[in-house]
Amino acid sequence: MENLSINATSQNKQIPQIFLNADNGKGEITGASFHENAFYLYREVTNWINEYLEENNAFSLTFGVNYFNTPSSKGIFDILTTLKEWTHENKIISIKWYVFENDDDLYEDIETMAEDVELNISIIMSDKKHQIAS
């Protein structure tokens, strides 16, 4: 299985940088997400996750998304729902989301999504844009 890399050089400012690593089962989604057709972008991520978890027992996803619009929130929600479904198959799923210390709105949005999907998301407050450890 191949890694998935989208917008690696941040050329498109409307979509986040996405890297999903098939070798270690870790993924990162960072930056802003406000493209009107974000559904297609996140469907590609969901498809990759499904393919990966068909053959593997664990996946860890770290978000550093600091802004998302409504179409993007639907795509992110679909990713979270997919991960939740895999927990029913005894897959180990870990999700972290880095949030600016002052961004109460984003914090609340993430909490709401986590509650709606019934999935544990570790929300990490940070004074930096994102601190993703690979």
Image: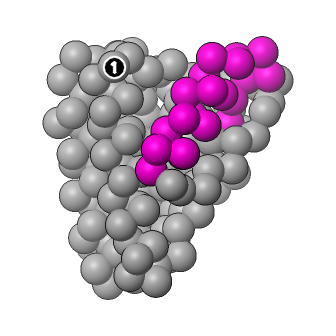
Q: In which quarter of the image is the C terminus?
A: bottom right
Identify the residue at image location x=61%, y=37%. 111
Q: Position of residue 88 (x, y in %)?
A: 40, 77
Magenta stretch, main secondary structure class: helix
Q: In which quarter of the image is the N terminus?
A: bottom left
Magenta-tinted stretch: 98-117
Give the vertical position of 80 relative to 32 (above or below): below
Residue 75 at least partly seen: yes
Rate crowding at label 1 as few (under 14), some (14 to 19) or many (20 or more) other CA atoms within 10 Å: few
Q: Would you identify the image quadrant in which residue 94 lies?
A: bottom right
Residue 12 at least partly seen: no
Of residues 39 and 19, the one nearer the viewer is 39
SS class, disc 1: helix
Give the vertical position of 114 relative to 67 (above or below): below
Give the vertical position of 122 relative to 6 (above or below): below
Q: Where is residue 110 in the image (x, y as percent from the top left)?
A: 57, 34
Give the vertical position of 122 relative to 51 (above or below): above
Identify the residue at image location x=42%, y=62%. 84
Left-right relation of 45 to 106:
left
Of residues 30 and 99, the one nearer the viewer is 99
Identify the residue at image location x=28%, y=23%. 71
Does 78 lie within the magenta span? no
Q: How many labels does the image show?
A: 1
Query: What's the amino acid at mark 1?
Result: Thr
Left-right relation of 8 to 112:
left
Q: Mark 1 points at which residue?
A: 70
Left-right relation of 60 to 82:
right
Q: Where is residue 121 in the image (x, y as percent from the top left)?
A: 61, 50
Q: How is the image coloured?
A: one colour
Q: Position of residue 12 (x, y in %)?
A: 33, 19
Identify the residue at image location x=22%, y=58%. 47
Does 111 lie within the magenta span? yes
